[in-house]
Image: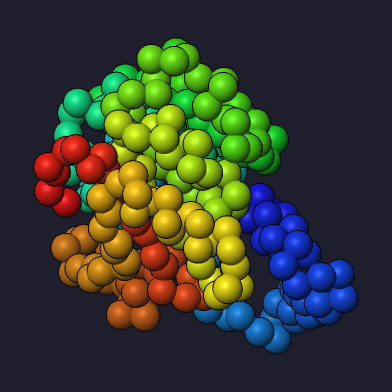
Amino acid sequence: MRTRLVKSFFILLNKKGFFFVIHKTIKWFLFKIAYAIGIVDQINKRRILLSNYLDKKFSSTIQYGQFKGLKLSNNPWGITDRGSIIFGIYEKEVSEFLKKIPNSFKDNLINLGSSDGYYPVGLIFNNSYKKAYCFETNEPSRKVIKYNSLINKVEKSIKIFAKADESFYKNLPKSVMNKSTLLVDIEGAEFDILTKKVFKKFSNSIFLIELHYHLRNEKDKKVEVFNKNIDEIFNKKFFTTSARDMSQFSELSQFSDNDRWLICSEGRAKLPCWVILWPKNKNLKF
């Protein structure tokens, strides 16, 4: 969460200027004060309460989905999402697309914006990938990735780096450039880091990117170039959040409707947008 706030701060500073960001920051602090004294955001308070309860009840261990059995630190980057993570429905669409990626692209996972290591540790843990390379700006988050890799006994297959920039690939073995999967969630920095050079370096790999168009101006030249580069090098498919079936979880049968759907919520301000990219010379179905 802290990583996202810092990234969003600098993105807004670059795009909107100093006075706009100061105004937004003051509003944010006032909101936090109101939250602390219980004036606003009772919904998020309830989400945190539910997530803490479920995290404790299930010993920070995922119960459903492709990461079933994965243990996580009880000091996560985003406790509000822990309920949906426990039941295997957090970013369900991303998980489903990851399962569809052919095995020939699954030797190496490169994760830009790894947070607490949910994806890289989980995908090594369930034997989907052989090696994972994690890039994460936030130092406490990097420590959590390391901890999660240790408690799940996959630390030998995980390599952790700090902040990714447009030359992040120089940290990787040359063999990783071909037929890898790149999972990217870097809060709008994708338009800066994923340059044409980067796309060409990984033109025989698959990208799965969370897009943050809402953090950029509609006429932002970098966004325009970013989209053009994608169309030149890859096939693409956009996707967003789809349905959840909360009735399948017997553990939640005694929960109220409101609480079940709050557990399912990811608390996003807007409908998210992801894109999966694959080489033009590959006839893949997603």
Q: Is residue 168 left or right of residue 155?
A: right
Residue positioned 29% across, 27% down in the render? 179
> How many numbered discs, if any?
0
Residue at image location 30% in from the left, 80% down from the top: 257
For the N terminus, the image quarter is bottom right
Relative image position of residue 215 (x, y in whole percent): 59, 68
Task: Tell me: residue 125, above or below residue 282.
Answer: above
**Which residue is nearer to you in this view: 145 or 60?**
145
Q: Position of residue 27 (x, y in %)?
A: 78, 80
Percent across and percent down for residue 261 are 34, 74
**Image quadrant assignment for residue 273:** bottom left
Question: Most extreme residue toward the bottom, as rendered?
Answer: 39
Q: Residue drawn 58% across and 80% down?
A: 42
20 up-or-down from 230: above or below: below
Taking depth in this image into account, of 239 and 95 the one nearest to the observer is: 239
Residue 8 in the image, given as x and y percentages of width and height: 67, 61
